[in-house]
Amino acid sequence: MKVHIECFPCFLRQTVTALSQFDMDEGVRFGIIGDVLGVLKDVDVEKTPAYATTFIYRTVKKRMGRDPYAALKRQFNEFALKLYPRLKEQILRSRNSLWSAARIAIAGNIIDFGIYESFDVEETIGRALEEVIAVDDFDLFEDELQGHKEILYLLDNAGEIVFDMLLIELLAGMGKRVTAVVKGSAVINDATMEDAVEVGLQRHCRVIDNGTDAVGTDLEFCSSDFVEEFNRHSLVISKGQGNFETLEGDKKKNVFFLFQAKCDVIAAHLNIAKGSMLLKGQ
Amino acid sequence: MKVHIECFPCFLRQTVTALSQFDMDEGVRFGIIGDVLGVLKDVDVEKTPAYATTFIYRTVKKRMGRDPYAALKRQFNEFALKLYPRLKEQILRSRNSLWSAARIAIAGNIIDFGIYESFDVEETIGRALEEVIAVDDFDLFEDELQGHKEILYLLDNAGEIVFDMLLIELLAGMGKRVTAVVKGSAVINDATMEDAVEVGLQRHCRVIDNGTDAVGTDLEFCSSDFVEEFNRHSLVISKGQGNFETLEGDKKKNVFFLFQAKCDVIAAHLNIAKGSMLLKGQ
């Protein structure tokens, strides 16, 4: 998915949201907006919105001098950990635990400070577990899992990774060797190694980082170690819109995208309603 | 009210809305976005958002080669004219026709393609006639009218001017000499002389233009003829957020602002909820 004109207001909205995390001098804020406008003038519209967002967040973080979302990420890890026991029970009691865990992992994708400013996690969990979703390749996903021993699991946001942990535990229980992937360093509220450790993910699977702060999974930015892991794995579970934007269309790769379509641009691209949930094979 | 950082995403959103009015080559659209980003880099944040918007729309209109809102303006004039007989009857039947006409004029301010992409006119009329509004200086307005024979009425949007026409007719019936003011040339969906003629406003009052395509009423941009009229009048009725942004704080001038607070920035500035209606004396 390439950059659309509708992405430009959103790029600035994301900047404003990041700048709103701390009290700062108004002049400094305007200075950062000015720098981001410079970045936007040079945006390569042939690449993905995630690609552009990488440069925007680098500019914001550098000029702010610290990670705007560090505190919020901790809060959402804690918040999700409180939901964990109830969700785990819900998954274990359900008729098809894999189905429930996949749906709950999709629900967790609502936790996103890049695109949203607020969201309702409980409502989203309910919707994920009760409703038909816009794209549902679950049967294919379930079948495909049979043929693979190893799974590369590309994580998305802090907080959300607790929801992913539930699915990963289940996959581990099925005898799969899961390698979960966090970002190499902070970008938006994406999970880093610190978040993985905070929620205890490494107790359930191997956790690696992709060596970059780029939004999504853009192999151009990732470390050679990660690229090797990516190439080695024949089955990938990919969480979130950024990962979808950067990995869709790679027909050589067996990827299942679990995410919510969070903006009008991606909704139009996929011909579904904004807010739709997807478990989409490729 | 000065430009806030929250205005920047909105500036681009307004640009995208304007660009969405016609089918155009995507490359041309990105080119116009690029030009607007250049304008935004030079925005004087010590001035009003309306001031910045003037330069944005000039850039968009020049590059598009035509007025993006010409067709929509005609549609909304026609739409409002269909409501006119019913609203007129409602005003004449009400206990205080001036009160009802003022409230209906405020309701008409919902018609705005700069800030909104869609809106519900009927719901807004109902809300204006039934509810307490956030700032209500109606008693002061009614009193003040007693002492003035002449009124300068600064119009805002096409379509909305039909709602204003109802208040103007009532004022004329009270023996007031009303001079209604349209923009000198097209900007967003602001009313120009063409719109005034289309709805028949000149049958009820004198109509002049302010000699500019600037958003709001910024005397720096207006014609000397208009500035003379503005200075000569001791009572002004000002419609819309743009006029409020550019005229608030001029303590020498007796202005009543009739409008809706359409964005978070102005709502915070006035310490009221977004969407609030105001009849605010100055």
Image (cartoon, coloured by chain):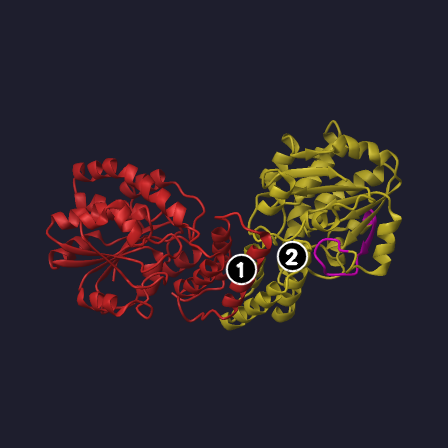
Chain colours: A red, B yellow
Q: Is residue A142 above or below residue B19?
A: above
Residue B214 part of the magenta segment: yes
Q: Position of residue A202 (x, y in %)?
A: 21, 50
Residue at horizontal 35%, vertical 39%?
A: A123
Residue A197 on the magenta span? no
The Cα atoms of the two marked residues, 1 and 2, are separated by 13 Å
Mark yes or no: residue A264 visible. yes
Q: Is residue A105 visible?
A: no
**Mark 2 residue crowding within 10 angstroms, few (<14) / some (14–19) / many (20+):** some
The label on residue B45 is: 2
Q: Mark 1 is on which residue type?
A: Ile
In the depicted view, which residue is nearer to us: A186 or B104? A186
* Image-based side of A113 in relation to A40, left or right: left
| Image quadrant assignment for residue A237 | bottom left
- Is the residue at mark 1 from the same chain as the one at mark 2? no
| Residue identified by numbered label 1 | A32
Judged left or right of residue A39, residue B234 is right
Q: At 63% across and 45% down in the image, what residue appears?
A: B266
A178 on left or right of A217: left
Q: Is residue A229 above or below residue A96?
A: below
